[in-house]
Amino acid sequence: MAISYVFDLTQGFPLLTTKKVSFKLIATELLWFIKGDTNIKYLLQYNNNIWNEWAFENYIQSSDYNGPDMTDFGHRSQTDSEFNELYKAEMQKFKQAILTDDVFAEKYGNLGNVYGKQWRDWIDKDGKSF
């Protein structure tokens, strides 16, 4: 017995999740993937913050970061309101640097081999990209 679902797309996009998600966020992330992009700058230009934490973690673990201790920021920001304010301020500075400083964005906005790269940049048996 096959089960199928029919959705009226005029009523919205049928996304199965436990939280409300804006279609604009889905669209910008999908376009980012399709472009083969791996840098969060494109997403930030559309106020899409879904991948920020991955890039931020790379930055705070680098020798270039000299701000307050952000160890385990994901958990701490959820359990410590004082730390959460500090985290939000550091994240805002990070996002602003990605948007305004191309060198910083290239170094810390790039996520490496994430979905977009995997979808668009395949390596053949000889190690060549196509």
Image: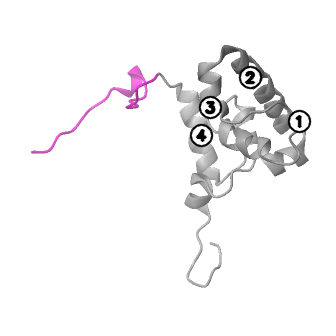
Residue 5 x %, y %: 24, 34
Q: Alpha carbon of mark 2 to alpha carbon of mark 3: how far?
A: 11 Å
Residue 41 x %, y %: 76, 40
Dot 1 falls on a residue whose secondary structure is helix
Q: Which residues are magenta?
A: 1-19
| Left or right of residue 18, residue 71 in this image | right
Give the residue type at disc 3.
Gly
Q: Is residue 37 above or below residue 93?
A: below
Residue 109 x %, y %: 76, 45
Viewer-nearest residue: 3 or 70: 70
Sequence-earlier tag: 2 or 3: 3
Residue 92 quadrant: top right
Which residue position holds label 1? 100
Q: Quadrant of the N terminus?
A: top left
Is 7 in the magenta?
yes
Sequence-earlier tag: 4 or 1: 4
Q: Alpha carbon of mark 2 to alpha carbon of mark 4: how far?
A: 22 Å
Give the residue type at disc 4.
Glu
